[in-house]
Image (cartoon, rainbow, N blue to C red):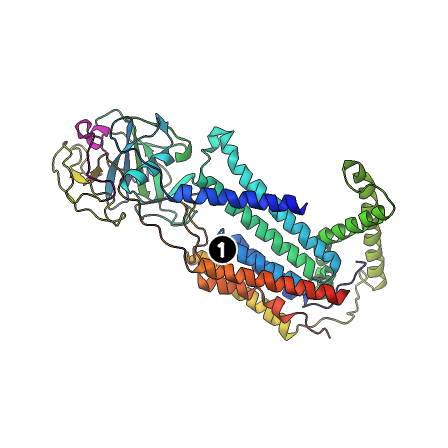
C-alpha cells in the first residue's frame, strides 16, 4: 500500500517536472514565412497590433495561434482556466488563472471572415481552445467591457492581405538571437514607418513592425494598426530565476514535517 | 466514543483554526502555500492528536487527498478522448494538478481537525437553543473518525480469529459489525443524553471548558492568517493563482508564508490545562 502510494506520488511529480520546461521553454517556431499563415489582431484599447503568424499545422486552435505568435513575435500572453482561456495579452489583463478577475473588462474573442480585403468581425461563440484556425483566417482579440457583440469593443478592421503581405515572405534575418535594429521593409500599404527594437515585449512586441493606415470606410474604429509580418522568432524572454519565497517555503515545510515526526515519535513513546 | 480524547484546546478554537486553514487552502492554487499548509497540518496533528484511533483518520484523509489529486490530474487527460473539451497541454495538466492539490490540502486540514478535536465537546458548549443542530453537526463531524476507528477494531478482531480481512468477500462481514456498533453508539449517546436531562428543557453544565489564553492565541493567529489571505485574494497580491500557460514559477510571498506558519500555533502551544 505504502509502495503504491509512493509510486503515485512519483508519477505525479515526474509529470510536473516534464510539463514545466516544455511549457516555459517555448516551442521552436518555424522561421520560414512560407506555408499556412493566419493573422492575429490584438487590440488593447489603446494600441492595436496585427501579427502574421505561421501555422505549424493545417489547422490550429485559437489558443495555439496565440502561442505561435508568442514564439514567433514575442507576443506576451497568459492563459487561464487551465490554458483554455485567454487572460492576458501584451501585458493587459489579469495575471493569474482567473481570466474574469478584471470583470467587466475581459478579452473579447472575434473571428474574421478571412478572405482578403476587409474583415467582418463576428463574436466567437466558442472558446479559443476549441476553435479551428486555418490558413488565411483572421482572429481578433479586443480588451474591454461588454458581454455581447453589441457592447464589447471590436478589433480594428484589417485584412489578411494587409497583415500577411504575399510579397513579404520569406524575410531573411541575420541571426535569430539578435533582433535587427533596422526592420526590413515589408511592402504593402501606406505609411511604412520603422520602429526601434525593444526587448520589453509589452512595450513593443516585435522588432519588425510598421504602421498601416486603416481602411478608409471605417476610420473611427481603428486609428492605427501596427502590423507585424512573418519572420523568424526573436529570442525568448529571459527566464526569471526561482522566486526567493519558494526555497523559504520549502525549508519551512521541511522544518514542520521534521518537527511533526519528532512529536509523533515522542508521543508514541509516552503512550507505550 | 470508546476512547476519550486527552485534554485539548477549547473546541471552538479548533473550529476557528480549521475554518481559517480551510479558507486559506480554498483561495489559492499556489503549490508553495498548499504544500506548506499540508506540512503545518501534519505538525499540528502530530502535536495535538487526541487518541491513537484518530491517527487513522488523519491517514485516511491524507490518502483521500492523494486520490483526489490523482483523479483531478487524470481528468485533464480526458481532452485526449473527448476533443470538444480542448487539447491536452502541459498547461491543462498543471492547472488540474494544482486544483487537485488544493482539494487534497482541504481534505488534510479536515483530517487534522478530525484527529485533534473532540466533536462532542462542541455539543457541550452550544447554547441550549442550538443544542440539537450542534449535536447533529457533532455527529456528522465525528462519523468519519468513529467509523474508521471501528473498521480498524473489527478487522483486528477478525484477524485474531483467523478470518480473511481483505478482498470483496470480507466486506459484508466487515460492514455488519461496523453498522451494528454505530447503532449501539447512537443509542448509548441518546440514553446518556436523556439521563443528563437533555430534551427536557433543563441541562446541567458539567465541568464547562473555559477559554484559556492558549486557545485564544490559537483562534487569533488563525484569524490573522485567514485575514492575510482574504486581503491577498481581494486586492490581488501574493500570486494566489500562479499562471499555468505559460507555466511560471509560483510565488511565495513572505507575508503569506508567515501567515501559514501562524497556523502552526496549536502545535507549539500543545494542550492547555483544562479547568
In this view of the protein, which residue sits in the foreground, B12 or A179?
A: A179
Place of residue B173 in the rendered image (x, y in percent of width and height, measured from the top left): 83, 41
Image quadrant for the C terminus of chain B? bottom right
Quarter of the image for residue A11 reads top right
Report the residue that reaches farthest toward the left. Answer: A191
The answer to whether residue B17 is seen in the rendering is: no
Residue drawn where x is 24% and y is 49% of the image: A199
- Residue A176 in magenta stretch: yes
Q: Looking at the picture, does residue B219 appear above or below residue A157?
A: below
User: As rendered, which of A169 and A149 lies closer to the eye?
Assistant: A169
Query: Where is B5 relative to B76, above or below?
Result: below
Q: Secondary structure at mark 1?
A: helix
Between B38 and B125, which is closer to the camera in this rendering? Answer: B38
Residue B64 placement (x, y as % from top left): 64, 47
Q: Chain of mark 1?
A: B
Query: Is B43 positioned to the left or the right of A268 in the image?
Result: left
Give the left or right position of residue A112, taking residue B119 as reference: left
Q: Is residue B11 left or right of residue A28?
A: right
Residue A175 left/right relative to A128: left
In percent of width and height, residue B136 lies at 72, 54
Q: Does the magenta run of residues contain B258?
A: no
Highlighted range, magenta: A149-177
**Magenta-drawn stretch, dominant element (helix, strand or loop):** loop
Residue A122 in view = yes
Q: Around disc 1, counting alpha carbons within 10 Å, would you say few (fewer than 14), some (14 to 19), or many (20 or more)?
A: many
* Residue name at image x 78 percent, y 50 percent: B152
Q: Tell me which corner region of the image, top left, top right, bottom left or bottom right, holds residue A59.
A: top left
| Residue at the disc numbered 1 | B32
Amino acid at each position: 500500500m505504502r509502495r503504491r502510494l509512493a509510486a503515485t506520488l512519483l508519477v505525479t511529480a515526474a509529470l510536473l517536472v516534464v510539463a514545466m520546461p516544455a511549457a516555459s521553454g517555448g516551442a521552436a517556431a518555424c522561421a520560414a514565412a512560407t506555408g499556412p499563415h493566419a493573422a492575429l489582431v490584438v487590440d488593447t484599447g489603446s494600441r492595436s497590433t496585427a501579427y502574421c503568424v505561421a501555422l505549424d499545422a493545417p489547422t490550429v486552435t485559437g489558443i495555439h495561434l496565440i502561442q505561435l505568435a508568442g514564439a514567433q513575435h514575442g507576443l506576451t500572453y497568459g492563459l487561464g482556466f487551465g490554458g483554455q482561456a485567454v487572460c492576458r495579452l501584451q501585458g493587459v489583463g489579469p495575471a493569474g488563472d482567473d481570466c474574469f478577475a478584471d470583470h467587466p473588462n475581459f478579452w473579447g474573442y472575434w473571428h474574421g471572415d478571412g478572405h482578403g480585403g476587409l474583415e467582418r468581425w463576428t463574436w466567437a461563440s466558442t472558446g479559443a481552445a476549441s476553435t479551428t484556425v486555418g490558413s488565411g483566417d483572421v482572429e481578433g482579440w479586443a480588451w474591454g467591457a461588454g458581454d455581447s457583440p453589441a457592447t464589447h469593443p471590436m478589433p480594428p478592421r484589417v485584412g489578411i492581405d494587409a497583415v500577411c503581405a504575399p510579397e513579404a515572405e520569406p524575410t531573411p534575418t541575420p541571426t535569430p538571437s539578435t533582433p535587427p535594429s533596422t526592420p526590413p521593409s515589408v511592402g504593402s500599404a501606406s505609411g511604412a514607418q520603422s520602429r526601434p527594437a525593444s526587448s520589453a515585449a509589452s512595450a513593443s512586441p516585435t522588432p519588425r513592425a510598421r504602421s498601416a493606415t486603416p481602411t478608409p470606410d471605417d476610420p473611427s474604429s481603428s486609428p492605427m494598426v501596427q502590423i507585424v509580418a512573418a519572420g523568424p522568432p526573436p529570442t525568448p524572454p529571459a527566464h526569471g530565476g526561482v522566486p526567493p519565497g519558494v526555497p523559504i517555503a520549502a525549508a519551512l515545510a521541511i522544518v514542520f514535517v521534521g518537527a511533526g515526526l519528532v512529536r509523533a515519535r515522542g508521543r508514541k513513546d509516552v503512550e507505550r | 466514543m470508546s476512547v476519550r480524547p486527552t485534554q485539548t484546546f477549547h473546541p471552538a478554537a479548533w473550529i476557528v483554526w480549521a475554518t481559517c486553514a480551510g479558507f486559506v487552502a480554498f483561495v489559492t492554487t499556489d503549490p508553495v502555500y498548499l504544500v506548506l499548509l499540508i506540512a503545518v497540518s501534519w505538525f499540528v496533528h502530530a502535536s495535538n492528536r487526541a487518541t491513537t484511533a484518530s491517527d487513522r483518520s488523519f491517514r485516511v484523509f491524507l490518502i483521500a487527498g492523494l486520490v483526489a489529486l490523482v483523479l483531478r490530474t487524470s481528468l485533464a487527460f480526458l481532452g485526449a478522448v473527448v476533443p470538444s473539451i480542448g487539447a491536452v497541454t502541459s498547461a491543462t495538466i498543471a492547472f488540474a494538478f494544482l486544483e487537485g492539490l488544493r482539494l487534497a490540502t482541504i481534505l488534510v486540514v479536515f483530517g487534522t481537525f478530525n484527529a485533534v478535536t473532540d466533536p462532542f465537546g462542541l455539543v457541550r458548549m452550544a447554547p441550549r437553543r442550538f443544542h440539537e443542530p450542534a449535536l447533529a453537526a457533532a455527529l456528522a463531524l465525528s462519523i468519519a473518525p468513529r467509523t474508521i476507528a471501528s473498521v480498524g477494531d473489527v478487522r483486528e478482531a477478525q484477524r485474531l480469529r483467523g478470518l480473511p480481512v481483505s478482498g470483496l468477500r470480507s466486506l459484508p462481514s466487515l460492514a455488519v459489525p461496523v453498522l451494528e456498533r454505530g447503532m449501539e453508539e447512537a443509542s448509548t449517546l441518546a440514553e446518556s443524553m436523556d439521563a443528563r436531562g437533555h430534551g427536557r428543557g433543563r441541562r446541567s453544565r458539567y465541568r464547562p471548558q473555559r477559554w484559556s489564553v492558549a486557545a485564544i492565541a490559537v483562534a487569533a493567529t488563525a484569524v490573522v492568517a485567514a485575514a492575510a489571505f482574504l486581503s491577498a485574494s481581494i486586492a490581488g497580491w501574493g500570486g494566489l493563482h500562479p499562471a499555468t500557460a505559460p507555466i511560471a514559477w509560483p510565488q511565495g510571498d513572505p507575508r503569506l508564508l508567515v501567515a501559514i506558519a501562524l497556523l502552526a500555533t496549536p502545535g507549539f502551544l500543545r494542550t492547555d490545562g483544562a479547568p
